[in-house]
Image (cartoon, grey):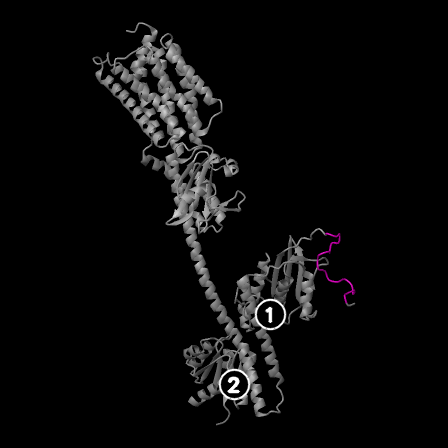
Amino acid sequence: MGEIRVLVVDDEPNIRATVAEMLEIEGYSVEEASNGADALRAIERHAPDLILLDMRMPVLDGWGFAAELRRRQVEIPIVVMTAARDAARWAAEIAASGSLSKPFGFDDLIRTVGEVRGAA
Amino acid sequence: MPSSPAAGIHEYLRLQLWEHPAHETSWGSAPAAMTALELLSWINRILFVVLFVAVTWRAIRQPTRAHFNTALLFGGIAFAVIGALAADAAAFDPPWLSGALITLLNLCPWAMLRLVDDFRGSPRWVQPGGTVAFVALAALGLLLFESSPQLVELATIAWFLVVGGYAAVAFASASRRSRGLTRSRMAAVAVGAYLFIAAIVIVFAAALLPDFQPVTGPVTQVLALASVVSFFLGFAAPAWLRRAWREPNLRSFLERSVHLSGVVDDREVVTELQRAAADALGAPGAALGLADAQGATMRYVRADGTWLEVPAETYIGGRAFVAQQRLIVTDAVASDPEHAAVYEGAQARVVIAVPLSADERRLGVLTVYGDRAPIFVEDDLWLVQLVADQTAVILEARRMAREAIELRGREETTLLKEEFLSAAAHDLRTPLTVLLGQAELLERRLERDPTSRVDPAGIARIARESRRLRDLVSDLLEAQRIEDVGPSTDQEPADVRELVRSSLERYGYDGAQFRSDLPDEPVLVRMDPVRLEQVLDNLLENALKYAPDGPPIEVRAWAENGETRISVVDHGIGIPDGERGAVFERFVRASNAQARSDTGLGLGLYICRRIIEGHGGRIWADETPGGGSTFHVALPAQVLREPMDGSPSGDIPLPPTSGVGPDG
């Protein structure tokens, strides 16, 4: 089935790096983007299979990014990751496939990503 | 026809004053005119007697000196009228009767003189002088009227003109100096006195000049009528009229007090209410005492604007408060000798005290005082009560408004705490995510390959996020601590230059990043040096954070206009217009700082502001010319005390000036 490509979108570089490392150890191929606009450009370059999306970001936030994807009729499963209490609600708002509440551990991340991949 | 001059005058006065005019001669010639004059004369006599009864009744109910003197004033007139009628009815007409009746009339100016003293005081000799003159005049009237009636006439005219006139003028001036109801009533009394004197003088003058008698008869009666009506208005005004006269006082009180609900300081409110009450009541002074919730203590505002707290039962006002009853004391010093000095100092001889209450709540007491008893006690009591009730309403409204604000404040505090927690939780989660992730990564790698090399980048991330977490936690705790207890007040003189230097050194900042511009002499502030360092660190860190690569950040300290000034000038991203005030609020970060996604709770500048304001200073942000932010701190300067031992630096912490240290 080849490498599964994951796009990690977060304005915190340390979080991006940490999440990317955890995914890479598990054999995922990871791209990084620091905000929604960055992420849109990354998608144009190479379509990911899954997007891990922080919601509160400068320039273009998670909601704007999701809306733009819908407008472009791009269908890529999204996992919302946020430090806010409303992870699940925000995930529902943008019709994401899953959510992760920061701080999440290795197992949470891999399980959630796996579940979303399996469902897709 | 009368046979002697005395008999002629006697006959004339008898007709003019004591009986209806010319009742024996005029039936046939001009009955209509005579009847009208006769009617008028009867009306006047009845009115004077009724007025006498009214004021006497009041004097019995409220035995004050002023009431007694009023009764005396109209008693003279009424007894003259009644005596003449009685003598006429009994055909009792001894030659001394007219002299006696004139003496009764002469009581009036004497009573007026006494009233003047009640109303506004008069020189010390006036009263005894008036009494001596009256006794002499009485002797003259009783003994000499028969032999030399002209002399008695002239003396009576002079008596009325001089003494009555003096009293009338005094009433008029007392009226001008009073306010509201008292002013109106006093004016009526003055008008009544003028008219009455005019009537009497004309009657007696006409007795000496018989040619004018046909004209003076009707004039006298009209003057007498006008006079008695005025006296009625002054001394026995009907309730509706008094209400109308009172209305402007109350209105002025309400107009002045309506703005008071917005005034924050209770002392200001008390002072203004006192002034308004005194003005509305025409009293020289008023004191408003506020009771505490238990009614155990009473607070007054001293002349210098400070609070004076006394046990609730203190002063005459305290007695009224404890008894919850209106009190009138006509000699304050005698009534409360313990506080004689207070009453004497305020020239408070007469005190009216009215307790203030709203429903069951006892709020305090309104005391109105002056150097003499109010003339119209009933009115004054009424008015004081109305003003007191209104004062109670205002105080109660203020209390309720304050409670509402406190309640809202508590709600806001709760809300802020929740916001605080949720913001804190959010900001703590981000570094925690990195810590947890990196730690588990290390764990996994070691599990898979126990010999694997440690990832230096991961360790660096753990260290960085741990430090961030530490700073966040200490910021949170600091902000919470400041919120709970306020900034530290442990204040000692500190040299700002030293604090700036040590801050710069501690962080190891080099000259490329910072430049300091400090004067040669010490720049002192009185504050906890640890606190000031905290502020400096925060400002320096901010400057570095938001202006990392620009020209060096400048730190200046100097003394200016009694203030110690510190400024931190950076050439970084600056703060957008309109946000420079808000960045000092809790959880507020400039929009461009957020966009840079530098994390932070938005507490640093808030903590700085709390500390600086807690030390009586100010902190604000400006735009640096050419871009960037300038943060200013102004603190009250510490004035150098006179050195105790001759050394100017005796108790001031100064840096060591040479290498001779404890270990050098």
> Which chain contains the residue that carries disc 1?
B
Respond whether the residues carrying marks 2 and 1 are from the same subunit.
no
Q: Which residues are magenta?
A: B644-662
- Circles 2 and 1 in contact, beta carbons < 8 Å: no
**B474 relative to B267, above or below:** below
Q: Name which residue lies at 62% across and 57% down.
A: B635
**SS for dot 1:** helix
Q: Name which residue lies at 46% across and 82% down.
A: A79
Disc 1 target residue: B546
Q: Give, as a three-letter code, the residue at label 1.
A: Tyr
- Picture quadrant of residue B620: bottom right
Disc 2 target residue: A106
> Which chain contains the residue that carries disc 2?
A
**B650 relative to B28, above or below:** below
- Measure how far apart labels 2 and 1 are at the Cα level: 34 Å
The quarter of the picture where the N terminus of chain B appears is top left
Residue B202 magenta-drawn?
Answer: no
The quarter of the picture where the C terminus of chain B appears is bottom right
**B33 relative to B488, above or below:** above
Q: Is residue B419 left or right of residue B19?
A: right
Q: Main secondary structure of the magenta part?
A: loop
Camera-side residue of B297 and B66: B297
Query: Residue B153: x and y, percent?
Result: 38, 13
